[in-house]
């Protein structure tokens, strides 16, 4: 138990999530008789969910800051239709269209951010209104028609990395990315370990690190293999690449930069943050703006994938994104959450969706199951905090007959935090 | 409500070799506590000694099974599984942080979770008569319908006690009840405790104000580093403050204030004709034409009663973080400053340590190292990227120099004892390296030893040529520390006294009169 904890830097919550995800994948792999972990399916899974995962990245920041954004689906749809029209009616090249779409997202975000941050209207209200406004606007400018986009624009939603270099039987750029990722993981782990040692902080034993690296790199290589051996003409999908870049960038911003710290500070205790010189209005404005920016991007990827923009694009996306964030361990009260957690939360939902589909479970049952999973995941979290047991893993380990230490500290601590919050 | 036992000095409570561990910390090791029925029993110890933890064990906050040892209460071994269970047995704890709901009325708070009902419907008529009764018992003259947020901390404390009395309390636990109270409110509370004792209610009190302990306690148990050191009988052993301190820190403390030879220079910081309006109420002023200055190397005290407007003055100067700015000028080194936001104030070299660390000073979700650097991220970041190594090093440095009691700087601040949280807040502001540092109740909830250290730190900052302003409700502290003291009454500065002319009496007179000195 302790060793496992060390394996993932003491972050049991995150570890529990990864564990659940792996368990889910194994479960479906067995029950779909191997149809889950095939190149085609995995590529599909990424293509079909990348836009929700992109939304989850923005949403987790919004939720950490203590807000919510209900308008993302409508904003995505509105940006999607506008870009399709720009390209079709004004004859703009696709990349100008993309840039204008991103700009439009920023403008919409500035509009919503203004009301939230500077007028002080709760984001729930502002974005509920935005949900109506931009849905209506999508149908107004698009006259409720579908508007096709040209093939080169479709590349951002359904393209693959092009083949180059020697004929290896694998897709070379995909392999390259995989190897770079492995190198980066090893390098950064060793570096952070060295730094921690230098500072005299406690570091886990060497074998723990090696085991961790083997597991993580193994997973990356296996995924690389799957992506690189797909049907000819397929490889690592472009939306997946965009997503990967965003995860790295936003993961870095949220955990390592000043503005990232400020977002957590504002969500954790706004007054204390303000008295420490944090400009909370600016922070709130930026998070809301960023959310719509990413929503615009997600909308365009979706349009690219479905080859046309339509009046019902993005319906219900906000709920998927919010669910991903909460499964990923964020707190409704703000101040807690991680980008990577939300991505894992989103993947749990995606794998569930995909697996149930492969098993031929209908949309009705799938919804019921997804709803229950959300509830149970968060309930586990709350239960673990109040019972003082350590997360899902702790529960699992207990069933394996090992003693699970009781950690009362977590109990009272949450209670205290809650009672103080009142 | 009276003790049923007949033989002399029966014990109402005995805690036997209680041990309580948190991950990485043994908060209590084999602690024993024996409380006689009908007495006032004090628990003393340094910050982080384990006092609050012991009381949380007793009251079921940490349920049976999470600690080892026995709790014998009214001659029975108890296994409380939560707070309700201990309340059922007549043990009520009033925590270091009050747990009242600001939006609800006094009456609603008193009956929260304990509502008198008639066929499932709350019987407000009965609640009203009972709360009027209870308020009379605790000596609080307020309408039961007044919202909690509209009464001061002192009165809130009394509401907590009324709430406890409503639960027919036999053993009342008060964790630092007077930390946030001024002298007259504290005195009222202590008198109330003596009154309760007269009615047979046993109390346990935790406090760092040793004069109060000496005044009301019958017995004192001293805890040091999670171990019970000794139990003193106040009358029989002739205990005084020095004796308690000796038990707490293991040695005698020569004096309460470190020696200090002030090196005062020219005027560094000056505020002129400062007028600030109440944030909500249109025509009310919270600062009335205030003028003050602080010189380099000088420690200036602000004395005033609770609600006199000291905090309001400080916060309005600190980047207009309180109230509506009306008029006034701020000068540093003779140059006028425009401080429109906290950011500008910090950049201009000001620092403000709040009196309300829980809601204004800390993000309880953060760890110690993030908190320490949170007001000066710039200093440890390059191109907006925070250098985690520097962060750790800085936090570690302050942990050592302030002697914060924690297993590591990666611990969450919510897990620290009250006094150690205060040290982290202090560290946060020291790290901004301000030229002008305003400290609002800097030693609230801090033990004698740590107070001495903090005074030393304040004097060191002054010796470095900084201007320090100390706001405090404890007059002895202001008298011992300040080179000059301003008195404030109802938002106006009513006088200023030099160290040699100031005394409790002279200050008190200025703090309670509207007399204006030129
Ligand atoms: N929930 C917790 N998790 C981990 N450690 C804790 C927790 N609560 C308290 N501690 C640790 O236990 C020790 C005792 O804390 P406690 O709050 O009982 O001190 P205290 O005597 O009340 O101090 P103070 O006078 O500052 O209030 C401290 O070292 C503290 O850091
Ligand atoms: Mg305490």
Image (spheres, rainbow, N blue to C red):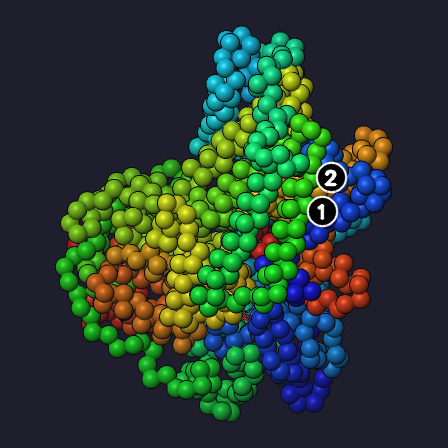
Left or right: B246 in relation to B87: left
> Which residue is disc 1 drawn over?
A21
Disc 1 is placed on an element classified as helix
Q: Are marks 2 and 1 in contact (CB under 8 Å)?
A: yes
**Alpha-carbon neighbours of circle 1 within 10 Å: few (<14), some, or many (≥20)?**
some
Q: Residue at x 54, y 49 (%)?
A: A183
- Which of the labelled discs sits on residue A351, or is there none? 2
Quadrant location, ligand no. 1? bottom right
Residue B363: give x, y in percent of width and height.
Answer: 49, 53
- Is residue B244 in view? no
Find residue A344 and report its image quarter.
top right
Disc 2 is placed on an element classified as helix
Residue A35: give x, y in percent of width and height.
Answer: 80, 38
Find residue B194 and report its image quarter.
bottom right
When the figure is inspected, residue B192 is found, relative to residue A226, above or below; the finding is: below
- Residue closer to the observer: B10 or B144: B10
Left or right: B12 in relation to B207: right
Q: Residue at x 24, y 61 (%)?
A: B466
When the figure is inspected, residue B474 is found, relative to residue B320, above or below; the finding is: below
For marks 2 and 1, the one nearer the N-term is 1
Find residue A83 and report its image quarter.
top right
């Amino acid at each position: 138990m302790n060793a496992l904890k060390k394996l993932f830097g003491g972050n049991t919550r995150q570890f529990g999530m990864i564990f659940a995800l792996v368990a889910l994948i194994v479960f479906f792999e067995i029950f779909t008789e191997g149809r889950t972990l095939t190149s085609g399916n995995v590529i599909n899974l990424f293509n079909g969910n990348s836009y929700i995962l992109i939304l989850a990245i923005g949403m987790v920041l919004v939720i950490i800051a203590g807000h919510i954004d209900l308008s993302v689906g409508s904003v995505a749809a509105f940006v999607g239709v506008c870009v399709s029209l720009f390209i079709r009616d004004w004859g703009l090249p696709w990349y100008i269209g993309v840039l204008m779409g991103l700009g439009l997202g920023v403008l919409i975000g500035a509009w919503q951010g203004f009301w939230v941050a500077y007028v002080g209207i709760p984001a729930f209200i502002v974005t509920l209104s935005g949900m109506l406004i931009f849905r209506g606007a999508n149908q107004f400018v698009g006259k409720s028609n579908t508007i096709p986009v040209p093939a080169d624009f479709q590349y951002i939603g359904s393209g693959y990395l092009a083949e180059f270099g020697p004929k290896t039987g694998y897709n070379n750029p995909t392999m390259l990315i995989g190897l770079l990722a492995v190198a980066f993981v090893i390098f950064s782990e060793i570096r952070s370990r060295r730094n921690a040692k230098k500072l005299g902080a406690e570091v886990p034993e060497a074998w723990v690190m090696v085991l961790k690296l083997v597991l993580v790199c193994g997973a990356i290589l296996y995924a690389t293999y799957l992506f690189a051996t797909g049907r000819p003409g397929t490889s690592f999908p472009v939306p997946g690449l965009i997503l990967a870049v965003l995860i790295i960038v936003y993961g870095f911003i949220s955990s390592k930069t000043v503005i990232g710290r400020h977002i957590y500070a504002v969500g954790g205790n706004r007054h204390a943050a303000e008295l420490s010189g944090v400009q909370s209005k600016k922070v709130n404005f930026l998070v809301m703006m960023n959310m719509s920016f990413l929503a615009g991007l997600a909308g365009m990827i979706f349009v690219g994938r479905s080859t046309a923009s339509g009046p019902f694009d993005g319906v219900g996306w906000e709920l998927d994104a919010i669910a991903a964030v909460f499964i990923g361990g964020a707190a409704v009260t703000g101040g807690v959450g991680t980008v990577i957690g939300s991505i894992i939360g989103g993947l749990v939902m995606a794998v569930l969706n995909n697996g149930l589909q492969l098993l031929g479970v209908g949309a009705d049952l799938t919804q019921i199951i997804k709803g229950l999973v959300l509830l149970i995941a968060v309930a586990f979290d709350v239960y673990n905090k109040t019972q003082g047991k350590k997360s899902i893993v702790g529960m699992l380990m207990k069933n394996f007959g090992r003693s699970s230490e009781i950690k009362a500290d977590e109990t009272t601590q949450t209670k205290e935090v809650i009672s103080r919050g009142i | 409500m009276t003790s049923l036992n007949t033989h002399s000095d029966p014990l109402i409570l005995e805690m036997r070799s209680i041990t309580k561990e948190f991950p990485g910390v043994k908060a209590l090791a084999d602690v024993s506590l024996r409380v006689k029925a009908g007495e006032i029993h004090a628990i003393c110890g340094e910050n982080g000694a384990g006092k609050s933890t012991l009381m949380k064990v007793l009251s079921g906050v940490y349920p049976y099974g999470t600690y080892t040892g026995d709790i014998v209460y009214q001659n029975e071994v108890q296994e409380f599984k939560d707070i309700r269970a201990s309340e059922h047995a007549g043990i009520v704890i009033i925590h270091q942080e009050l747990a009242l709901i600001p939006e609800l009325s006094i009456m609603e708070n008193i009956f929260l979770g304990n509502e008198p009902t008639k066929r499932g419907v709350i019987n407000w008529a009965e609640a009203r008569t009972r709360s009027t009764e209870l308020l009379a018992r605790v000596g609080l003259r307020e309408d039961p319908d007044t919202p909690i947020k509209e009464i001061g901390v002192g009165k809130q404390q009394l509401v907590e006690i009324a709430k406890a009395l409503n639960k027919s309390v036999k053993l009342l636990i008060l964790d630092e009840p007077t930390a946030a109270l001024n002298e007259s409110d504290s005195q009222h509370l202590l008198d109330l405790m003596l009154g309760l004792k007269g009615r047979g209610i046993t109390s346990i009190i935790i406090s760092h104000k040793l004069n109060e302990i000496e005044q009301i306690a019958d017995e004192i148990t001293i805890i040091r580093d999670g171990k019970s050191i000794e139990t003193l009988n106040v009358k029989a052993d002739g205990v005084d403050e020095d004796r308690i301190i000796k038990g707490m820190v293991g040695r005698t403390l020569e004096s309460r204030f470190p020696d200090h030879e002030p090196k005062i220079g020219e005027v560094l910081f000056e505020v002129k004709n400062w007028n600030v309006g109440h944030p909500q109420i249109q025509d009310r002023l919270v600062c009335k034409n205030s003028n003050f200055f602080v010189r380099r190397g000088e420690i200036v005290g602000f004395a005033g009663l609770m609600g006199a407007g000291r905090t309001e003055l400080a916060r309005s100067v600190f980047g207009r973080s309180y109230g509506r700015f009306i008029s006034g000028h701020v000068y540093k080194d003779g140059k006028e400053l425009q401080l429109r936001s906290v950011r500008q104030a910090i950049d201009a070299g000001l620092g403000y340590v709040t009196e309300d660390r829980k809601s204004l000073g800390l993000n309880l979700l953060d760890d110690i190292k993030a908190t320490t650097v949170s007001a000066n991220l710039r200093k440890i970041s390059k191109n907006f990227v925070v250098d985690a190594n520097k962060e750790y090093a800085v936090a570690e440095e302050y942990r050592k120099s302030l002697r914060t009691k924690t297993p590591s700087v990666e611990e969450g601040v919510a897990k620290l004892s009250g006094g150690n949280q205060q040290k982290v807040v202090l560290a946060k502001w020291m790290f901004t390296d301000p030229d002008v540092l305003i400290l609002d109740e800097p030693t609230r909830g801090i033990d004698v030893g740590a107070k001495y250290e903090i005074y030393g730190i304040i004097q060191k900052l002054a010796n470095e040529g900084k201007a320090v302003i100390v706001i405090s409700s404890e007059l002895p502290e202001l008298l011992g520390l300040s080179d000059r003291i301003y008195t404030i009454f109802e938002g106006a500065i009513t006088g200023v006294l030099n160290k040699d002319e100031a005394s409790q009496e002279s200050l008190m007179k200025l703090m309670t009169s509207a007399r204006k000195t030129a």
